[in-house]
Amino acid sequence: MRKGLLVLTFLALCPLLVAQQSLNNDSIVKLVKAGLSEDLIVSTINASPGTYDTSANGLIALKTAGVSDKVVTAIVMKSTAPASTAQVPASSQDPNDPMASHEAGIYAYNEKSLDHKMTMLEPSVYGQGKTGGIFTSAMTYGIAKAKIKAVMRGAHSNARVTDPQTVFYFYFEQQSAGLSNASNIFGGTSTPNEYTLLRFDVKESTRETTIGKFNAFGASSGNDDKATMAFTYVKLKPGMYKVTISAPLQSGEYGFVAPGAMAVATPYGGGAGGSGRVFDFGVN
């Protein structure tokens, strides 16, 4: 009775003992010759690391040694299965590592800084709230164009960067281009190519940028070319992009403007007001 109990205990612990070392063809043959059941050997194969010879000669040698088809099949399946990658809990990841998982959003990253800190750009809302050149337009009987300006509250953004060559990382919640959920932080976008980087004119208590022009004959929307900053981007992995500004940024206030620019409302009629989101930051 005691001997049978010892045998059962050994069989139960066998997968744990074998898992301490990598298995191979010889290990499996030894388990078979020791009288272990097929199910137990298969469980041990699935639970343990192993390096097997699954060539024709290797499989023939296993069969000749008395290894059953069920066990041989388990060996082949184990050898061809892709290596599993353990998921690292978000709490244990370095929040300043660009390649780690991050909350959806845009992050500024100073590659030259010793602390390599990532700064998330909180989205702000700007609205169509100002016109310019109305007097000149009126004096020319509506021939000269007046400007429609988008205005952001506050002269400076809370997010600050010090390196004029700061890079930016875009993390999209949805990873398939054109299929992002419109309810997330990006409002349905999935690539940096949908955004415009603008430099804002700083006033006493606001930041402004031109979003359209109009006169008596019509109106047009669009950002001021002089305020638009060029950038390039590279896709690092699904839903993650690295954005590099084409030229060093001068001191000032900037923002990545989301697509869907506001329609232009004019004193001459037509158009409609609105608002848009911008991921703003300032360069010291």
Image (cartoon, helix red, strand yellow):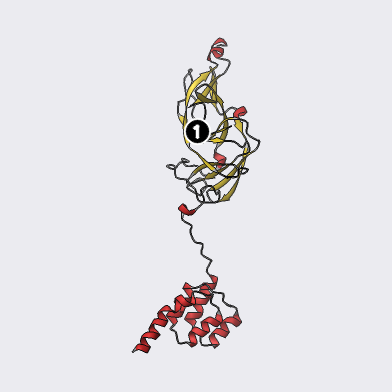
Instruction: List x then y, in percent, for residue 217.
Output: 54, 18
Q: Reply above or below: 79 against 256.
A: below
Report the front residue among 128 and 168: 168
Q: Residue at x 50, y 53 (%)?
A: 93
What residue does disc 1 label?
158
Up/down of 134 relative to 162, above or below: above
Please provide percent x and percent y for residue 185: 46, 41
The one nearer the camera, 182 or 269, is 182
Which quarter of the picture shows residue 196? Answer: top right
* Residue at far left of view: 1
Q: Residues within 10 Å of mark 1 (few under 14, many from 20)?
A: few
Image x and y of residue 157, in percent = 51, 31
User: Going by the picture, which residue comes out furthest to the right?
Assistant: 247
Which residue is more in the foreground, 220 or 224?
224
Relative height, residue 201 to residue 168 (above, below): above
Q: Quadrant of the C terminus?
A: top right
Q: Residue at x 54, y 71 (%)?
A: 80
Residue lying farthest to the front in this orientation:
114
The image quadrant where one finds the N terminus is bottom left
Q: Residue at x 45, y 77 (%)?
A: 15
Vertical placement of residue 277 versus 214, above or below:
below
Q: Position of residue 239 (x, y in %)?
A: 52, 49
Tell me the element at label 1: loop
What amino acid is at disc 1?
A: Asn
